[in-house]
Image (cartoon, rainbow, N blue to C red):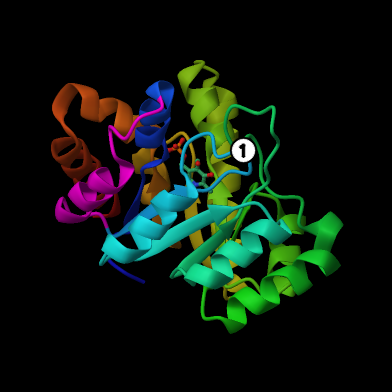
């Protein structure tokens, strides 16, 4: 296990701001390169079916420009599989997607779709992509992710972060304990454990402290914080907190 989890910076919401005006700025690829220079261990981008933030062209340009790995988030659709197989990013993270949601609200229902997902991810794995499945801290889903042949699971930290920001501290502690237990469980099956969604300076440390967690993917908060202190200092502070938590 590494001394600290890798930090993947999700640049989707740079594209959200760009798309609010429909032009070329701010450019998420420029943000990705800046994040890379600031020491991000990877870049995450979610190409949604409705292209509300990241575009096909952004993925094309990220693949050409990045030297750190791209974690390509996508729904398990035929269209996305074709795009992933064309680009062969370092990692593909399969997420659930509903058009009406504002963000990825829950984890993937792997157990219910085991057969289809096993067939779906096989060509991605054969193409050399590390396949990660975004799931809730739920034993049944972790077992199913393992059975379908995923190498990585990313635990959804949204319920933990929401409980914290809403002041429901008993719920927060329960969610955190579930994340801890399921990190240990997934690791015992040989799955690499990642975590993300909704993490902030206030919530990152307890998750970063789990020795099984190898990667944290953080976007919305960092891009928001960049407005006030700049992207590089925002990333450096997150890295400092992650390192401190692991130490
Ligand atoms: N990990 C996954 C799988 C996600 O879908 C997202 C949101 O796109 C994130 C991490 C990052 O979440 P946030 O933007 O809330 O930090």
Q: Is residue 166 shown in magenta? A: no
The quadrant the N terminus occupies is bottom left
Q: Nearer the viewer, residue 241 or 111?
A: 111
Identify the residue at image location x=63%, y=50%. 95
Which residue is label 1 attached to? 50
User: What's the magenta region?
Assistant: 22-40
**Residue 55, visible in the rendered structure:** yes
Residue 177 at x, y = what percent?
56, 43
Residue 210 at x, y = what percent?
42, 54
Compared across the picture, whether 242 is left or right of 47 comes to left
Identify the residue at image location x=53%, y=48%. 47
Compared across the picture, whether 25 is left or right of 96 comes to left
> Please, is residue 225 above or below residue 132 in the view?
above
Identify the residue at image location x=53%, y=25%. 162
Residue 240 at x, y = what percent?
19, 45
Task: Label 1: state its secondary structure.
Answer: loop
The quadrant the C terminus occupies is bottom left
Q: Nearer the viewer, residue 46 or 22?
A: 22
Mark 1: give few (<14), some (14-19) or many (20+) Cα within 10 Å. Answer: few
Identify the residue at image location x=25%, y=43%. 31
Q: Nearer the viewer, residue 153 or 97?
A: 97
Choose top left, top right, bottom left or bottom right for residue 28: top left
């Amino acid at each position: 296990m590494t001394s600290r989890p890798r930090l993947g910076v999700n640049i989707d919401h740079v594209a959200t701001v760009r798309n609010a005006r429909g032009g070329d700025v701010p450019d998420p690829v420029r943000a990705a390169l800046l994040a890379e220079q600031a020491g991000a261990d990877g870049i995450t981008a979610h190409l949604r079916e409705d292209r509300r933030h990241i575009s096909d062209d952004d993925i094309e340009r990220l693949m050409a420009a990045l030297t750190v790995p791209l974690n390509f988030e996508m729904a398990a659709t035929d269209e996305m599989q074709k795009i992933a197989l064309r680009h062969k990013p370092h990692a593909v993270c399969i997420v659930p997607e509903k058009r009406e949601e504002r963000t990825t609200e829950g984890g993937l229902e792997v157990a219910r779709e085991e057969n289809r997902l096993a067939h779906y991810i096989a060509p991605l794995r054969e193409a050399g992509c590390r396949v990660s499945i975004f799931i809730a801290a739920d034993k049944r889903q972790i077992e199913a992710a393992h059975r379908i042949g995923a190498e990585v699971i990313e635990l959804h930290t949204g319920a933990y972060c929401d409980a914290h920001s809403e002041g429901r501290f008993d719920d927060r502690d329960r969610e955190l304990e579930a994340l801890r237990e399921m990190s240990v469980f997934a690791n015992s099956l040989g799955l690499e454990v990642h975590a993300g969604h909704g993490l902030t300076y206030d919530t990152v440390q307890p998750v970063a402290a789990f020795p099984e967690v190898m990667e944290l993917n953080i976007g919305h908060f960092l891009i928001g914080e960049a407005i006030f202190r700049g992207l590089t200092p925002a990333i450096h502070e997150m890295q400092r907190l992650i390192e401190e938590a692991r130490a």
